Image (cartoon, rainbow, N blue to C red):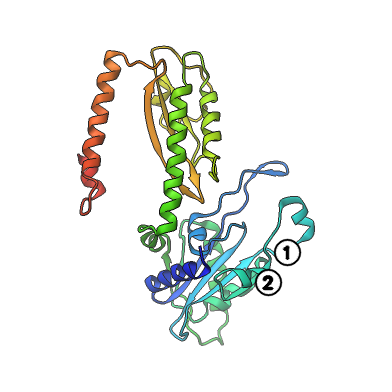
Amino acid sequence: MEATAFKERINSLAALMKEGVAIIPSASYVQKSNDTDFPFRQDSNFKYLLGFNEPDCQLVIVNKSDSEEVETHLFLRESDPFMEMWAGKRMGVSKALEVLSVDKTYSIDSFSEELPKLLKGAPKAYFDLFDSKTHQSVLKATKTLYGQRKVKAQKPTQWQHLTPLIGKLRLIKDHNEVLALNAACELTNIGHRGAMALAKPGLNEKAIANFLTTAFTMAQGEGGAYDHIVAGGQNALILHYIENNQSLNDGELLLIDAGAQLNTYASDVTRTFPINGKFTSAQADLYSLVLEAQKSALALATIGRTLGDIHKE
C-alpha cells in the first residue's frame, strides 16, 4: 500500500477522535526460552494504521484545536549494527521519517520524556484501556503535566477507549484488505481439503496439524491465525483442544478448527468429517442437521441483517 493510504486511515481516526491524542503501541517480542522468542506477530491496529512491522514502537496521533493538521509521531528502535547482526535489520529513526506516513520520528528511548509534551494542550487521551503498559505510560505523563503548575495549557481530563474507534474504521475493508482475506481463505481451503485427504485410522492428530502448518505457509501465508485444533473423537468436546497428539480411530469423527493468516489478516474455519471417509447413520444425521442450519444462516447473511438475526436462525 502507498503511504498516502495509511495517512488517510490516520486522518479518519483523528476525525472520529475530534480532539485529543491517541497512543497506539506496536507488539513486542515474547520470550520463549532463554535467548529465543516466539515468532513475532504485529499488533493488528498498529499495522492497520502504519503498515510497519517492527516491534517496540509507539505511534502517537495528535489532533488539537490549535493545530490545523493532524500530527503523527513515531517512536521506534534506533539502528544498531550489533543487534541487527543477531536479530535482523531495523529501519531506524532517520529512514522511517523518509519511508513511513509520519511527521516526526524519535528513538523509543525518548518516549517517556516526549509523551507529556505531546499530551499538553489536549483534553483527551485515547488508548486501549485494557493495555496496562500504555495505561501506566499515560498515567505517568499526565502526572508530569499536572505537576508543572506554571504550565497554563490544557491538560488531559479524560481517558477514552480507542479500540472501538479503530474497529469502526476496520469494519469496512478496502481492496488490499479483501485481497489479503481472500488469499488467507484460499490457503485455508487448501489446508482443510488436504487434511481430509490425509486423514485415516491410526494416523496421529499431529500429522494433520503439521500438514496444516505447511499449507498455511504457502504463497506468502504466515501460518495459522491461531493454534490449530485437530480433535479426533471425544477430543472434539474440548472447546480449545490444542494438544493434537492422539491417534485417530476408525469409526470416529475428526474436528478441525484452523485458519491461515496473511499480512495479519485471519481466516477461521471449522469442519468435521469421518476419519475413515464414511459416516455412520447417526453421524450423517447429525452432520445434516448442522449443515442445514449453516445453509439457513448463510441465506440470512444479507445487507440489513444483523449477526443476532443469523445466530437466532
Residue 158 position, x and y percent, is 42, 71
Q: Earlier in the sequence, mark 2 or mark 1?
A: 1
How many numbered discs? 2
Q: Relative to residue 165, is residue 141 drawn left or right?
A: right
Residue positioned 62% across, 68% down in the render: 75
Residue 112 position, x and y percent, is 62, 69
In the rendered image, is residue 112 in sight? no
Residue that carries the numbered disc 2 in the rendered image: 94
Residue positioned 38% across, 75% down in the render: 18
Q: Relative to residue 56, is residue 9 drawn left or right?
A: left
Secondary structure category for the residue under label 1: loop
Mark 1 crowd level (few <14, some 14–19, many ≥20, 10 Å Cα)? some
Residue 252 position, x and y percent, is 39, 16
Residue 86, placed above or below residue 164: above
Residue 189, placed above or below residue 68: above
Residue 101 image-quadrant placement: bottom right
Mark 1 belongs to which amino acid? Ser
Residue positioned 21% across, 51% down in the render: 305
Residue that carries the numbered disc 1 in the rendered image: 79
Q: Which mark is residue 47?
A: none
Residue 154, placed above or below residue 162: below
Q: Extreme right residue here?
A: 82
Residue positioned 47% across, 28% down in the render: 194
Pick whichever, 310 or 65, lies toward us. Answer: 310
Mark 2 crowd level (few <14, some 14–19, many ≥20, 10 Å Cα)? some
* Dot 2 and dot 1 residues touching (CB under 8 Å): yes
Secondary structure category for the residue under label 2: helix
Mark 2 belongs to which amino acid? Ser
Q: Relative to residue 190, is residue 87 drawn left or right?
A: right
Residue 218 position, x and y percent, is 55, 40
